[in-house]
Image (cartoon, helix red, strand yellow):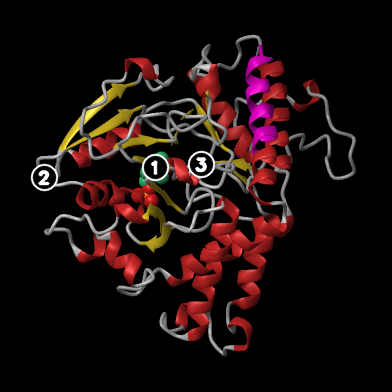
Amino acid sequence: MTRPSHVRPRAARTVSTSAVASADRPTAPKLQSHGRVFNFSAGPACLPAAVLEQAQADLLNWQGSGMSVMEMSHRGKEFIAITDKAEADLRSLLSIPDNYKVLFLQGGASTQFAAIPLNLAEEGDKADYVVTGAWSKKAIGEGKRFLLANAAATGDNKSIPDPSTWNLTEGAKYVHYCANETIGGVEFKAPPSVGDAPLVVDMSSNFCARPVDVSKYGVIYAGAQKNIGPAGVTIVIVREDLLGRARASTPAMLDWSVAAKDGSMYNTPPCWSIYMCGLVFAHVLANGGLEAVEANNEKKAKLVYDAVEASNGFYASPVAREARSLTNVPFTIPSSPDLEKAFIAEAAQAGMVQLKGHRSVGGMRASIYNFMPLEGVQTLADFMREFAARHA
Ligand SMILES: *Cc1c(COP(=O)(O)O)cnc(C)c1O
C-alpha cells in the first residue's frame, strides 16, 4: 500500500513495540482471522466469522442432504426445518408473544414503507408519522401515496422532538416511527407512548441490538443486513389482530395475512438469507442472547463517544446526548474537512474501512452493529486519539 502524502514522517510517532508492528509501518493494518478488516459499513454489515465458517462448511452439502441450501426446494423438509428453527430462535431471542406472527419477506424495509399503509388502512384513512431523519422521511413519503400521512413531529436530524409537542391525530390507523435513524445516528431509547393507535416501528438498524418488549408494538419490521444477516430478507413481526385488514387492492406479495397463512412461502422465499439469519440467531442464543449483545453494544458505543468527548473539540458529535445511537455513530472534525478525508484514508490503511459519513451528513460514521467486535471499536478509539494528538 502506498502512503498518502499527508501522512507525517514516521519518526514523529510513538510506535508499538509488539513483534508484528515495525517502526516502518506504524499503521500496519490490524487484521482479524482470514485477513478480515474491521468493517464499519452501515449495511450490509459484518457478520460473525463463526457464522460465515459454518456457512462455508455447509455450502456444498448441508447436513448430509447432498445439496447446498441454495439448491433445496423451499417446500422440502430440510428447508422447512431451517425456517422453523430460525423462527423459533428469533422468538426466544426477543421473547415474541404467541399472538404475534413472524414473517420472512423480500423487498427490504423500503417495501414495507408501502406495505404498512396497504395492510393497515384504506385510502382516505389517517396515519401519524414521527419524522426524525432520512428513513422516517422516506417512510412518510411512501405513506402519502396510500393514505393521509400526517407528520406528527419533525425533528432536526440531531434529536427527538419532545413527545409533548407531537401532533397525534384522533383516529389514526397507526403511528409510525424509526427506532434508529441509521444516517443521522438518532435513536429512541424506548418506544414512545402514543395512545391506542398501533405502534409501527422501523427497527432496521437496531433490530436485536438489545432486548425489546414486543408487546408494546403493533408491527416491528427490519431489513436483515445491518444486525442479523445478509441482505435479501426482511423480518416483519405483526400482532395477529392487525392481520386481515389489507385493502382489497393490496398485491398478494405485500399482504401480510397471505404471508402469515403460507408460513412466508406464498412464493419462493429468500432461502439463503433466511438460513444465514438462522445461523446468526443460533449463534447469538449460544453466546448469551440479547442481554449480552446489548452489554457489548453499550461498551462499543461508549468507546467511540468517549473518544469524541475527550478530544477537546477536535472531534464533534452532531447528535444530542440523550438521542445518540448505539449502532451508528456519526462524528466530524469541525476544524477541517481535509483532516476528515485524511482520517478516513488512514483508518482504511490501518484496516478500518467504510468510515465515511453518509453523503448527506459528511464527516465520519462508525456503524458498530451487533457483530462489529469490541476489538474493532477499541482499535478505532485508539486511532481517533492518536490521529487527534498528531493533528490538534
Ligand atoms: C437500511 C434501512 C432501511 C432500508 O432498508 P432496505 O432493506 O435497503 O430497504 C430502512 N430503514 C432503516 C432505518 C434502515 O437503516
Identity of the residue drawn at 48% across and 25% down: 363
- Mark 2 and mark 3 lie on one chain; the one further toward the N terminus is 2
**Which quadrant would residue 240 be assigned to in this image?**
bottom left
Structural crowding at the residue carrying mark 1, measured as other residues with C-alpha within 10 Å and reported as few (<14), some (14–19) or many (≥20) = many
| Residue 232 visible to an observer of this rendering | no
- Say if residue 195 shows up in the picture: yes
Amino acid type assigned to the residue bearing label 1 in the image: Asp
The residue under label 1 is: 202
Question: Which stretch appears magenta?
Answer: 297-311
Q: Which residue is mark 3?
A: 206
Asked if ligand 1 lies within 8 A of label 1, the reply is yes
- Of the two numbered discs 2 and 1 in the rendering, the one whose residue sits closer to the viewer: 2
Tell me if 127 is positioned left or right of 110 in this view. left
- Label ID, residue 123: 2
Q: Where's residue 348, x and y in %?
A: 60, 39
Nearer to the camera, 269 or 391:
269
| Mark 2 vs 1, N-terminal side | 2
Residue at image point 63% right, 49% down: 371
Amino acid marked by disc 3:
Asn
- Identified by mark 2, the residue type is Glu
Give the SS element for disc 1. Answer: strand
